[in-house]
Image (cartoon, rainbow, N blue to C red):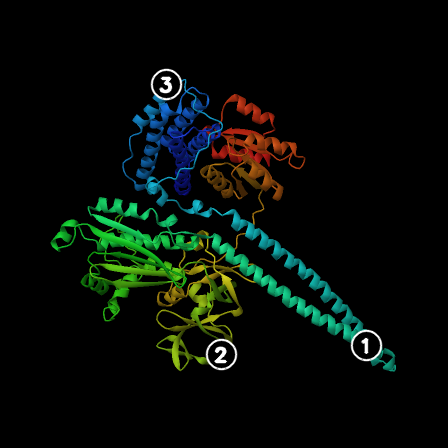
């Protein structure tokens, strides 16, 4: 497994590991107070089993071995060969060890020695059975809540795939379902309107026929009555059709707006869900740096769009680390200044006018003007004369750090903060306080719609937010003049720089001005307006900005993407970065925008309750060009099979609600799927399990312990 894939899978595993441990811990805590049911014990057993498979997928042998022993202990409790009370203590110890071990792995610190805890788990397996029967079928168990500090550093590292899943209340789903039904009804109404318009066209055809006859040398009176009647009918139909069309369009618009509003509500989540690990991160870093701090976070229960929270996560983390690295002094230095040796770092959140305000402050030494001016003299002397020298700290590449370490990062400075907040159409401010410093960020609470101008450039459709566009023009070459070797355009009685956007974005492939007249867009940049030559203006529309995925997501050139009226994705350029391109011409072209072509390869359904295993298998298969869908259990898999055609199914065995063998039986009993090949990929390697799977109709039975990527791919190729 290559390192890049392993790192991606680790990010998924962090989330799954925390989830499994939380469920097992809740079970143990409640079982110590009230009788537990066999279903609750089975769930704990399944969690340990899934954790074992997930740990194996990312090559974490220590966690795999521990999960296997825990799974075996639960199996013995199920068989009444062990009592839960006799092993509860060692199971709690293993849960704590597992969290500490993974936290150390994340922090790249020395790993705790697993020998003792594994030995204790093995010793617990050979204890004598107690006569006490602990399983009570009718017992009721209340759900325990895992304390926030139990999640540890793991929760701070939950990224990527885990963020794709959001809990949605059933009430919201019912509302959305109802609204979608109404939307469908209004769509069907368009068919009625279309029929009415067809009648109008027929009447027009009749009218044209009568008119043609009137034009012949036949007395007009012969056709006068028919003509008048047709005209009256046509007028009535036209008025009714126009009225119905207006009503239907208005209703559709109302339903769409209501649907959008509800979807936005669903996407809202507490800030705590993203920021909860920051305090522990700061305390750990402070301890490593020999500093003492007191952290205070307020307003974490405020709700904001989850996409917004994910996009501001890195800027906030950067500012917090910056406060610790550059703001808070070492204890001895603070004592010499008459300060409390314990520094303070705070993060305060509030809502103002539908905007999320984040204030990150410290009581440290504030800005070091002499150090900033010294660095400016070295890198940007032109800013030394500016009264706004404080703004220099937000310039790309500016940093006063002399070295690189975990706390200071890699000398990127605060430009990453400015860039990220600008992408959200937000604001950032520097508020000095005595003592210390305060940064204030202002971003929308929800993903907002943008007024966009769509245009073509180098054969692609691109867009810019309308707030940055001053004017659209159609000009001739004669309006351009050269000043000191640079092309300019006279606009509003001033000469502004003129550029070909084709050449800015794709300097190696784009040509300059080739026509006498052409389209120009006046763009407002950080320093001054500039004129950009385009191929053509296409449209103006209101659109929701969506985050990009893949390589384009890493480029500052793009704010995101929007959908055109035809449903095609359109990249939205970042006006701030376009302005920077005019100051720092690129040596090579910017990444071109390409739509992914739909693969013509087979469609495969992966069924596994472990998100780590699902992601591993999905990544392997997609790397070979297959189209892959996933399901968490047999029940969900059957639903997907009814909705979509699949060429092959890969399933685990032990899953909640419906296991893999029951899924296999259901598939083979359905005439539509009887020839659908099914591969069973599981950790159950007993001969009886393999025999049963093959008897039910599995095309292949692969054991995860012996799993090899090439073997799976060869089997798929053989079956397809």
| N-terminal-most mark, 3 or 1 | 3
Q: Position of residue 145 (x, y in %)?
A: 39, 39
Q: Give the crowd class for mark 2: few <14, some 14-19, many >=20 residues within 10 Å.
A: few
| N-terminal-most mark, 1 or 2 | 1
Give the left or right position of residue 629, taking residue 445 as reference: right
In this picture, is 415 found above or below 680? below
Q: Residue at x 30, y 62 (%)?
A: 394
Q: Give the crowd class for mark 3: few <14, some 14-19, many >=20 residues within 10 Å.
A: few
Instruction: Give the labeled residue for mark 3.
Output: 127
Q: Which numbered disc, 3 or 1, marks the residue closer to the eye?
A: 3
Q: Looking at the picture, tell me which residue is in the foreground, 270 or 639.
A: 270
Q: Are marks 1 and 2 in contact (CB under 8 Å)?
A: no
Label drawn at residue 227: 1
Give the left or right position of residue 332, taking residue 6 as reference: left
In this picture, is 436 found above or below 232? above
Q: Position of residue 92 (x, y in %)?
A: 34, 30
Separation of residues labelled 3 and 1 (CA atoms): 102 Å
Q: Residue at x 54, y 43 (%)?
A: 629
Label drawn at residue 476: 2
């Amino acid at each position: 497994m290559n390192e890049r894939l392993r790192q991606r899978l680790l990010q998924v595993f962090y989330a799954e590991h925390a989830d499994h441990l939380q469920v097992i811990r809740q079970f143990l805590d409640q079982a110590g107070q009230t009788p537990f049911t066999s279903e609750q014990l089975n769930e704990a057993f399944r969690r340990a089993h899934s954790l074992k498979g997930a740990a194996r997928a990312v090559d974490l042998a220590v966690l795999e071995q521990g999960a296997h022993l825990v799974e075996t202990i639960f199996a013995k409790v199920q068989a009444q060969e062990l009592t839960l009370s006799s092993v509860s203590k060692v199971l709690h110890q293993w849960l704590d060890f597992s969290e500490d071990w993974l936290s150390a792995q994340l922090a790249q610190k020395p790993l705790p020695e697993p020998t003792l805890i594994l030995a204790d788990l093995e010793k617990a397996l050979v204890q004598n059975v107690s006569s006490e029967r602990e399983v009570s079928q009718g017992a009721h168990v209340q759900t325990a809540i895992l304390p926030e500090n139990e999640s540890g550093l793991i929760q701070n590292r939950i990224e990527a795939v885990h963020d794709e899943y959001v809990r949605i209340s059933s009430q919201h789903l019912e509302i959305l379902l109802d609204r979608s039904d109404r939307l469908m009804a209004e769509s069907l109404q368009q068919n009625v309107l279309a029929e009415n318009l067809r009648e109008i066209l027929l009447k027009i055809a009749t009218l044209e026929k009568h008119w043609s006859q009137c034009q012949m040398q036949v007395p007009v009176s012969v056709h006068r009555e028919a003509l008048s009647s047709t005209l009256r009918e046509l007028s009535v139909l036209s008025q009714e059709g126009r009225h119905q069309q207006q009503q239907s369009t208005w209703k559709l618009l109302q339903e769409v707006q209501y649907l959008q509003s509800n979807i936005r509500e669903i996407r809202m989540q507490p800030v705590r869900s993203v920021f909860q690990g920051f305090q522990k991160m700061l305390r750990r870093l402070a301890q490593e740096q020999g500093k003492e701090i007191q952290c205070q976070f307020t307003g974490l229960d405020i709700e904001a769009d989850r996409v917004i929270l994910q996009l501001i996560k890195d800027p906030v983390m950067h500012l917090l680390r910056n406060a610790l690295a550059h703001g808070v002094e070492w204890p001895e230095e603070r004592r010499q200044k008459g300060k409390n040796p314990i520094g303070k770092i705070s993060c305060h959140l509030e809502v103002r006018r539908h905007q999320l305000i984040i204030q990150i402050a410290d009581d440290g030494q504030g800005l070091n003007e002499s150090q900033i001016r010294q660095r400016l003299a070295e890198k940007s002397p032109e800013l030394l004369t500016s009264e706004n020298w404080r703004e220099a700290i937000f310039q790309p590449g500016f940093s006063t750090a002399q070295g690189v370490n975990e706390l200071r990062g890699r000398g990127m400075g605060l430009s990453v903060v400015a860039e990220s907040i600008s992408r959200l159409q937000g604001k950032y401010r520097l508020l000095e306080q005595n003592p210390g410093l305060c940064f204030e960020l202002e971003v929308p609470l929800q993903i907002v719609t943008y007024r966009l101008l769509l245009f073509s450039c180098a054969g692609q459709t691109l867009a810019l937010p309308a707030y940055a566009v001053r004017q659209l023009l159609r000009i001739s070459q004669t309006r351009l003049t050269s000043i000191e070797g640079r092309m300019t355009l006279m606009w509003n009685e001033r000469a502004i720089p003129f550029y070909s956007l084709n050449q800015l974005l794709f300097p190696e492939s784009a040509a300059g001005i080739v026509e006498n007249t052409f389209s120009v867009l006046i763009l407002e940049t950080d320093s001054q307006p500039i004129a950009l030559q385009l191929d053509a203006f296409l449209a103006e529309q209101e659109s929701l900005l969506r985050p990009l995925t893949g390589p384009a997501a890493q480029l500052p050139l793009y704010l995101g993407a929007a959908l055109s009226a035809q449903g095609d994705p359109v990249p939205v350029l970042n006006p701030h970065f376009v302005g920077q391109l005019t100051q720092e011409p690129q040596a090579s072209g910017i990444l071109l925008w390409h739509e992914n072509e739909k693969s013509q390869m087979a469609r495969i359904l992966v069924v596994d309750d472990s998100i780590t295993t699902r992601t591993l298998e999905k990544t392997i298969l997609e790397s070979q060009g297959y189209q892959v869908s996933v399901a968490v259990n047999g029940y969900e898999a059957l639903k997907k099979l009814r909705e979509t055609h699949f060429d092959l199914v890969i399933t685990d065995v032990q899953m909640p609600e419906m296991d893999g063998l029951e899924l296999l039986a259901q598939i083979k009993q359905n005439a539509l799927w009887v020839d659908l090949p099914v591969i069973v990929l599981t950790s159950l390697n007993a001969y009886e399990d393999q025999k049963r799977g093959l008897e039910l109709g599995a095309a292949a039975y692969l054991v995860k312990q012996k799993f090899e990527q090439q073997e799976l791919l060869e089997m798929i190729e053989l079956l397809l």
